[in-house]
Image: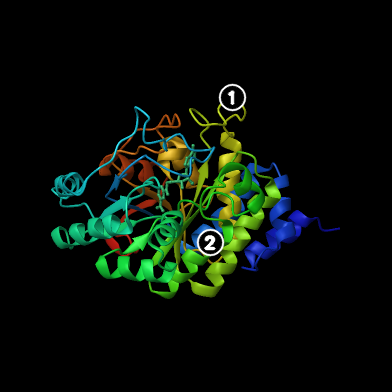
Amino acid sequence: MNTVFDDIEVKVKNGIRLTREEGIALFQSNDLSWLGYLANIVRQRISGEYVYFNVNRHINLTNICTARCDFCAFGCDADSIQSYTMDKDNVIAIAIQAAKDADLRELHIVSGLHPDWSFEYYLDIITSLKERLPHIHLKAFTAVEITYFAKVSGKSVRQVLTELHCAGLDSMPGGGAEILSDRVRGELCPNKATASEWLEVARTAHQLGIRSNASMLYGHIETLEERIDHLLALRDLQDETGGFQTFICFPFHPNNTALDGKIIKTSVWDQLKTVAISRLMLDNFQNIKAYWVMLTLPIAQLALGFGANDIDGTVSEEKIIHAAGAKSATSLTKEAIIETIREAGRIPVERDSMYNIVKIL
Ligand code: V47
């Protein structure tokens, strides 16, 4: 008699969508090599031997944050000695310096929810960056930040997104999704966008022609069922809009967070399983990113054999996960990324932020 795993294998090989129950069964399997084998079939079918990366820089405008999520070590109160803010001149100087590297293609801008900044400040940052560096793609503000801008400005999410888009915002990063469950958010991050608000921002952005990424923060208080329901919520929205470019799963780093000492970091086994199962469940996503900052470079390289076809970028000055004790570098050279991909037997492809090929290496 066929087991659920035999049925799953037949479905994957025939390109048939997996159900919620099958997703849960995959998490119950500990046959890591089989999960990798299946995810590899899907990855190969969708994107062949190419592994994408880009040359980018992260800018975090402030770490002062009203949300103070339990899983975050980056956000702090305004009176903390660790708090900082960047003014417009500061941001522009950093961006111009970064753009001296002719390969730089993207600025990735994610920040805390500052209690006193107006929406106009963020709008001005985007306008000014676009004026000075029109060739640089601005991937800025998670759905959580967009919800916050709408709240502080009294404008609708659609209006906020429209104004940012007109000012020069090109796409949005995938952060802030955490686990799209009211139970989990109620416990870990009650002071920011709810699950349905996060999804609604992504939906509206896609309707306006702004593409965005999606993510999942796992390895904390969520159940395996909640992980699958999270992936299904993203899959449903992708069916509707087609506006997600890539999916990234973030293993929770507990150091210096409110959960430090209560939760231990998830295993490498679980990290590779989660990449593989994400690749299998998100059949309508073109790209699965192995974010080396969170995984470390050797595990990100390994994840390329478990369904990932993207390794993010050079990054330059990652702060959010390093605040939570990440052991990876804070930036990488393009050469190091290329070597990592080649060692995995894949073809490195430098891309722009919309996954257009810049160079096959
Ligand atoms: O939203 C915060 C996560 C995200 C921790 O779209 C944590 O290409 C693990 O959005 N342990 C911010 N994860 C990062 C982000 C991002 C990064 C790289 C690429 C892209 C992209 C987006 O980091 C947060 C949250 O989900 N996070 N704290 C932690 N302690």
Q: Where residue 356 sits in the image (x, y, percent)?
A: 31, 65
Q: Is residue 239 visible?
A: yes
Q: Residues within 10 Å of mark 2 (few under 14, many from 20)?
A: some
Mark 1 vs ligand 1: CB below 8 Å: no
Q: Please name the residue that numbered disc 2 is placed on.
A: 197
Image location of residue 321, percent across then percent down: 42, 37
Q: From this view, report whether residue 16 is shown above or below residue 56.
A: below
Would the CB of label 2 be found within 8 Å of ligand 1? no
Q: CA distance from mark 1 to mark 2?
A: 31 Å
| Mark 1 surroundings: few (<14), some (14-19) or many (≥20) residues within 10 A | few
The residue located at (68%, 47%) in the rendering is: 224
Give the residue pinned by disc 1: 261
Q: Is residue 327 left or right of residue 10?
A: left
Please name the residue shown 47% across and 47% down the image. Answer: 304
Mark 2: which secondary structure?
Answer: helix
**Of callouts 1 and 2, which one flags the residue occurring earlier in the amino acid sequence?**
2
When asked about the image quadrant of residue 330, the answer is top left
Taking depth in this image into account, of 327 and 334 the one nearest to the observer is 327
Pick the quarter of the image with the N terminus.
bottom right
Instruction: Answer with left or right where residue 310 lies relative to residue 279.
Output: left
Is disc 1 placed on a helix, strand or loop?
Answer: loop
**Mark 2: which amino acid?**
Glu
Which is more foreground, mark 1 or mark 2?
2
